[in-house]
Image (spheres, rainbow, N blue to C red):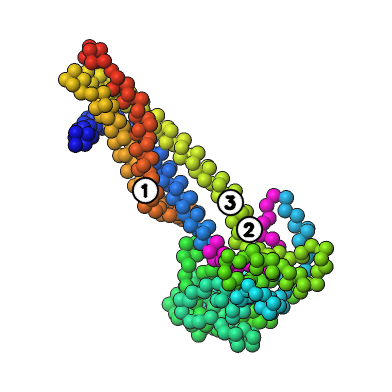
Amino acid sequence: MRFLLEVWESLFTALRAINANKLRSILTTLGIVIGITSVTAMATVINGIEQEFENDMSELGADVLYIEKWPWNRGPGFKWWKYINRPDITADLVEVIEKRSKFAVAAVPVANTSRTIRFNDKTLSGVPVQGSSAKYPDVFSVDLQSGRYFSDLEDRGGRQVCVIGASVASELFPIEEPIGKYVRLSGVRMRVIGVLEKKGSGAESQESEDRQIHIPFTAFKNNFGVSKRSISVRVKIANSDYVEDARDELTGIVRAARKLEAQEENNFEINEQKTLREQLAPVKLTIYLIGIFLTALSLLVGGIGVMNIMFVSVKERTKEIGIRKAVGAKRRTILLQFMIEAITICLIGGAIGVLIAMALIGAISLILPAALPVSTVIVAFIICVLVGVIFGMAPAWSAAKAEPIAALRYE
């Protein structure tokens, strides 16, 4: 109880000292405000990038393997000429995999292109068009806002139907119901049978699923051709724990289908989410290190400012310190008083910095993905306390060890 009373008294004294020197306190907190704003803004961007990355990774699927012509890992020293002459991946691999694989739940061919879509006088250019089979929802999660996905019968018959993304629907049909309407996809008349659920967060990107159009693979082949393009065969594994076993099994199946000799190298690639994570790990680490360096530099400047002003405050109140020690104040009490004052200044600056960062989130999100969880705010205030303790310790200790007689004589 005695300790709590000392803390309360020290807090009251600190607030009174801050209030007595408003301008100086504002200038002192300015460094902390800039530092905490930098910390919070940087954490907001890093959290946003992390969430966006995890969302992208989840869309790829941890239990999905991609049989493709090109590898995903194309870092420094990538030898493109080694892969360009590989034979294209063809859709007939799907049937082979479904017959022979023990680990595969479903396999689908996926072909991509970019086309122009038109409805009446509204036109969208460069829209990603994906051709796949009716089993696509068995491999990837497909959430529909309205309508349905195309059936196996429509796929095999090459019916001219399509499922459009939420952004495509809102731009072509701002006031109409798109289901049942006919659009022109590079001159091909197609009926809209479904609209995908809006993903949000970067939905305006050209490659976003919100701007995609899904059509049956047979219709894609008939209208745009697949003989001169390499497709991607995507295989859903029953359990993500068996991805490595499934990878080995698929390697053998594809090698046998392509009639490769034992000494021949693979002329195909089996990509997975893990490959992309490994490739992007150095980029994420670099972003984190730059963020830590910038925020540490900002807080160092702010902390030095607090320490400087606290030394000034100790000098100004030397006689007060002498009087308090003369009437029995312990060294611990004086130390606690100035430590709490330093922490209070940092917390006030931190609160202002967090509020500024929260106001900046809207502007940041226009350029980069941003997310501000409660944990980031809590960490920001913990950092404020640590800065107050670290940079307030030296001035507080100089006040605590002052001799009462020398302090009383100080002018």
Identify residue type, mark 1.
Val
Q: Residue at x 63, y 67 (%)?
A: 65
| Magenta region | 57-76
Quarter assignment of residue 306? top left
Task: Check if residue 71 falls in the magenta segment.
Answer: yes
Residue 284 percent coordinates (x, y): 55, 50
- Gap in angstroms between the C-alphas marked 1 and 2: 33 Å
Residue 166 can be seen, yes or no: yes
Q: Which mark is residue 281?
A: 3
Q: Please report whichever mark, 2 or 3, sits nearer to the chain's N-terminal start.
A: 2
Q: Secondary structure at mark 2?
A: helix
How many callouts does the rendering have? 3
348 vs 193, left or right, is left
Q: Mark 2 highlights which residue?
A: 275
Residue 230 percent coordinates (x, y): 71, 70
Residue 407 percent coordinates (x, y): 24, 15
Is the residue under label 3 in contact with that under label 2 (CB below 8 Å)?
no
Q: Nearer the viewer, residue 294 or 339?
A: 339
Around disc 2, counting alpha carbons within 10 Å, would you say few (fewer than 14), some (14 to 19), or many (20 or more)?
Answer: few
Quarter assignment of residue 56? bottom right
